[in-house]
Amino acid sequence: MRDVAIVSFAQAPNVRCETERNEVEMLMPVVAEALAASGIARGEIGFTVSGSCDYIAGQPFAFVSGIDAVGPWPPINESHVEMDGAFALYEAWLKIQSGEVDSALVYAFGKSSMGDIAEVLTLQLDPYTVAPLWPDAVSLAALQARVALDRSRVTERAMAEVAARSRRSAKANPNAQLRGDFDVDALLAEPYLVAPLRKHDCPPVTDGAAAVVLAAGELASRSCARPAWIRGIDHRIECHSLGARDLARSASTEIAGEKAGAFTGSFDVAELHAPFTHQELILCSALRMAPSVSVNPSGGALAANAVMVTGLIRLGEAAARIHAGDARRVLAHATSGPCLQQNLVCVMEA
Amino acid sequence: MSRSLQEAKHVLEYPYRRSVGPVLGRFFGALAEGRIEGVRTQTGHVLVPPQEYDPQTGEATGEPVAVASTGVVTAWAWVDRPRPKHPLANPFAWALVQLDGADTALLHVVDAGEMARMKTGMRVRARFRDERVGEIRDIACFEPEEAR
């Protein structure tokens, strides 16, 4: 295996609705910032890969125009995944492992505000027996929360505590969208949105973009004073039939965590991609997270949730803790699909 | 001063005619007749809705199996304010319903009137539409078995 590291990370400020700039215009400064921080010239990047979703952009093959953000001339070695940028990063890591390239630019964009994101996400469901009923993303998450509550895996109070802690942590994150101090008892007095979820259990609607540069070996050491070396990365998916899955636990996270090395050694920071409060609790359980670990110091997906970008930001935020010298060993997680269907776990070290 | 617009309205709508395949084709055929059919896996489990492959083993599934139109709610979520596209216009519950004779649960809605009537483990019965065409919405909803 080659030693590969995240050497730089940049993100656009996460906002409720970016009215002035389109996706390319949001991405351009982010890509430029990530490249500049790496010191690797645009033309020297070996591979470029992006993550986005056409239904969010409302434009089939949206990545074809998204590529304008990186200035693909002369023609570049490029790929795209119709997934969160975290899964694009996995492809970039594989490409570097293959020995074909030594560096990669990974970017993601998502303007969730342009449509009705909770209904857009319905389109990823089984088109025969599920999607025609139009269960929205909040409703499906609520069903999962019910299973976790019924099995005593979570409590409504613990869920509210996740919301309060996330938005309190986000006060230290200038790129977060939803931040502040919330009283848990006051949150629990709020009405249900889709019971058993209240508004605070759900993520905000967010527009955002992010970019990461990966580099191997010597190049990584030259590109970054303190590279975040990827020591393990794995992702696993569960079947699509919601009624055939155990929604109270995350079997795919458990396996990805095992393969990525999440169960050896300790972590200073964990950035978990949990758009709903109960999902953070399910993930912490799946990853056997010790109480000493600082979970989502950025505020996580509950403070900013640009769909298709949020997972890549978890990897970037975790790596940035190492870059800054604030952490030695970190864990990052990204998810995709309804009710934590697919999960990626990445372990990084200084 | 020159004008600059900030938004362009964009409606994306494509009709499709998808193939359902023989496994779902049979399921929808049964729904059109007001019955529910699952499929048996090689390990003997009954999947409803049916799948072409056993999600536990990846093996192809076998023969169709009739299951009941009644079952148990294994999970539910209450919607006070339905969205326009939701199957019911009045407050309702999303539910995973494990039909009698099935080993997996079907996602559908329960028309229970009020949240207080919902609980995990409650029994429900499918209410079929009068005019059925062979699709999941031929089941209009589920209803609590116990009368109000």
Image (cartoon, coloured by chain):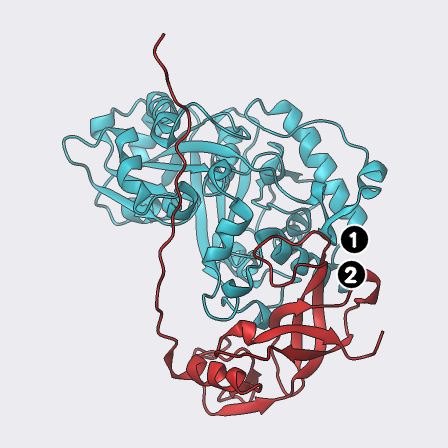
Disc 2 is placed on an element classified as loop
Please tell me the numbered disc located at residue A152: 2
Q: What residue occupies the far front of the structure in this picture? A: B131
Which one is in front, B102 or A327? B102
- Within 10 Å of disc 2 (Cα), the crowding (few <14, some 14-19, many 20+) is few
Residue A16 lies, in percent from the top left, at: 55, 30
The type of residue carrying mark 2 is Ser
The residue at 71%/59% (across/down) is B90
Separation of residues labelled 1 and 2 (CA atoms)? 7 Å
Residue B126 lies, in percent from the top left, at: 66, 79
> Would residue A261 be visible to someone looking at this image?
no
Q: What residue occupies the far top of the structure in this picture? A: B1
Q: Is residue B111 left or right of residue A116?
A: right
The chain holding disc 1 is A
> Would residue A181 be visible to someone looking at this image?
yes
The residue at 66%/78% (across/down) is B127
Cβ–Cβ under 8 Å for marks 1 and 2: yes
Q: Colour of chain B?
A: red
Q: Is residue A306 above or below residue A264?
A: above
Please tell me the numbered disc located at residue A155: 1
The type of residue carrying mark 1 is Thr
Q: Is residue A58 left or right of residue B96?
A: left
Residue A88 lies, in percent from the top left, at: 37, 45
Disc 1 is placed on an element classified as loop
Please tell me the numbered disc located at residue A309: none
The chain holding disc 2 is A
Q: Is residue B52 above or below residue B8?
A: below
Q: Which chain is depicted cyan?
A: A
